[in-house]
Amino acid sequence: MAEKRKLRVIYRSNAHAPLWVVADKSGIWGENGLEVDTSPQLIREKAVESLKSGQVDVISGNHHNLYERNAIKKDDFVHLAQAANTWTDNLMVVSNGIKQVQDLRGKKIAVDKLSSHSGLNVWLFLRQEGLDVDRGDIELVAVPGPAEERYNRVLKGEFAATFVCIPHDMRVAKAGGRVIPVRVMPMIRGVTLTTTMTFVKSHEEEIRRLIRGFVDAIHFFLTRKEETLRILKNHLPAALGLKTDEEFAALYGEWAQSLERKPYPSTAAMANVFELALRRNPEIAGYNPVAMWNTHYVRELDDSGYIDKLYSGR
């Protein structure tokens, strides 16, 4: 592995940055014979076109909007590995009188964008809890922008609830508001390694190194807490807005609880994210969502015993 291979990666949300920053600053990419250039691209369409045109090699994300591209337009996008399989915006900020999810019936709930991943997550969660927006059980209202805007309007009584992740729950509590943790819903979200089969077929060595580095980064994150926290405090993007040691500790705890040691997607998470895709594009109902995934390289590494040895200390 003398010659380092280069990869260009963009992540679709600053919320993905913790794992990419740790992988970079810990030296893991170099240990796996890679030079990885990472940068954010928060506009979905630009990210997809950059990948399709070959301007970048891998996207971190694009979870629910590529099914239509493959099913209808016959593109060859593919997901290779999944860092986490659970929804983390499961902290419900509530107004007076709301004690449980069922109390939202007949009420207005603030979300980011109705068709965004975060907005669709709320739609699906509430539907699974028996509150269907299409039946008029609840009303979802788009309030684009930072989470602070939505939860402040809940605290003022304009909305019955909104859903946030850490550290917003702590900030709400300090402002005198109430936060109710709700069921953790399986969901494909966060760091998903996405590329094209065209790239995979012509760069198998780079993909194998990427998957091993990905596994190593997760292992570093989970087993070297103090070093990870030091990296996060020194190198996370300012856009994440973490302010205190308590908030950094909460971020670490959320990631440590969610990360998959073996980065396979769960079947429940795949099924749920496909529900989001169907909400956007009902015409793809006949598409098999498993066809979007190629976990061959994770399985190959897993079958070699490499991941088990990492955690056994051998």
Image (cartoon, rainbow, N blue to C red):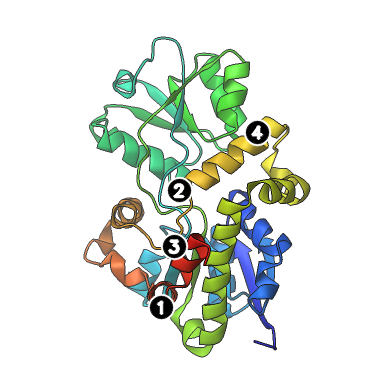
Where disc 3 sits, the SS reads loop
Please indicate whether residue 195 sits to the left or right of residue 33 in the image.
left
Lower position in the chain sequence, tag 1 or tag 3: 3
Measured Cα–Cα span from mark 4 to mark 2: 24 Å
Query: Which of the image's four quarters has the N terminus?
Result: bottom right
Q: Are marks 1 and 3 in contact (CB under 8 Å)?
A: no
The residue pinned by badge 2 equals 117
Where disc 4 sits, the SS reads helix
The residue pinned by badge 3 equals 263
Q: Residue furthest right?
A: 234
Lower position in the chain sequence, tag 4 or tag 3: 4
Q: Position of residue 146 (x, y in %)?
A: 61, 36
Measured Cα–Cα span from mark 1 to mark 4: 37 Å
Q: Quick check: can you spot residue 116?
A: no
Residue 274 is marked as none
The residue pinned by badge 1 equals 300
Q: Which amino acid does label 2 sit on?
A: His
Q: What residue type is labelled 3?
A: Pro
